[in-house]
Image: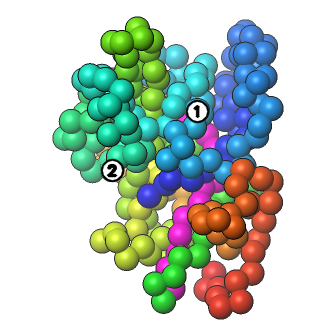
Amino acid sequence: MCYDVKAKLESQLSRAKRKNDFVWMAELEEKLKPYNDTPIFKASGFDHPKLLIYEQTNPNKPVLAQWGLVPNWIKNDFEKEKIWNNTLNARIETIFEKPSFKESAKTQRCLLQIDGFFEHHYRNNKPFTYYISRKDNEPITIAGLASDWLNLVTGETLKTFSIVTTKANGLLAEIHNSPKLKAARIPLLLTEQKEDFWLNETTEDTLNQISESKLEDKLKGHLVAPIRGKNNLGNTKEVTDEYIYDEFNTLF
């Protein structure tokens, strides 16, 4: 699963800069100035933070969206709050079946770029936190689903997203061993070659071409301080620093 991420603005903008679409970049960066005042060293999906996503309709120009997909058939804030924490992640195996995701899977796929994400490893039923990033420290591109929800009371439209996950293997299968899961999960990581494929060409029949992450061998992981509980470091630069647990002998 993926509920906590590090996502500095520079990393979130890397696709736009790579595509050399600078016509609107100055306008966007001006708009994002207040947002950039607080870098995202650690954001929890359960707080529903805003991150930049790239959508099918305008694949090189990112827009702000709130984490936690709200389907367009949700009627009011009460229903939104009830479903919100359950749509932070979407399993790729069922996105064309689940009512919350199937419309977005057909017409509103998106991607986002982050520095890394946090996962828990269990030993003797105790969780230890790992931070996962690329070995070359380049941004990680993740597949997502988006939805525009119209609040009928206020008339405002809320743009939301969910992170798509798939089965883990290799390093992540070793780290993400939650006893609550039958199998380890990982965000669906996209190579540069697969970014546009996910946005523009993917159908239910071709999902098997990208359902397995091809980037896990490019990832690294290290133990960090707990991200839950009263002693967590919160959204601070130190949250991704390596941390030594006296009771843990690392396997990796």
Q: Magenta residues, as a range? A: 107-123
Instruction: In the rendered view, tell whether residue 41 sits above or below residue 216.
Output: above
- Which percent across, then down, holds residue 56? 45, 22
Is residue 20 at all visible to an observer of this figure?
Answer: yes
Is-magenta flag for residue 116? yes
User: Mark 2 sits on what residue?
Assistant: 91
Instruction: In the rendered view, tell whether residue 166 sits above or below residue 156.
Output: below
Secondary structure mostly seen in magenta is: strand
**Quarter of the image where one finds residue 179:** bottom left
Instruction: Work out which quarter of the rendered image holds the N terminus and state it.
Output: bottom left
Instruction: In the rendered view, tell whether residue 210 sits above or below residue 48.
Output: below
Give the alpha-carbon distance from disc 2 to disc 1, as whole Å. Answer: 21 Å
Identity of the residue drawn at 55% across and 56% down: 215
Is-magenta flag for residue 207? no
In this rendered view, identify the residue nearer to me: 142 or 82: 82
User: Please, what secondary structure does the residue beneath circle 2 have?
Assistant: strand
- Which percent across, then down, holds residue 101? 29, 36
Q: Are marks 2 and 1 in contact (CB under 8 Å)?
A: no
Q: Residues within 10 Å of mark 1 (few under 14, many from 20)?
A: some
Instruction: Work out which quarter of the rendered image holds the C terminus and state it.
Output: bottom right
User: Mark 1 sits on what residue?
Assistant: 50
Is residue 115 at all visible to an observer of this figure?
Answer: no
User: Please, what secondary structure does the residue beneath circle 1 have?
Assistant: strand
Identity of the residue drawn at 42% across and 11% down: 154
**Quarter of the image where one finds residue 109:** top left
- Which percent across, then down, holds residue 200? 41, 26
Circle nearer the N terminus (2, 1): 1
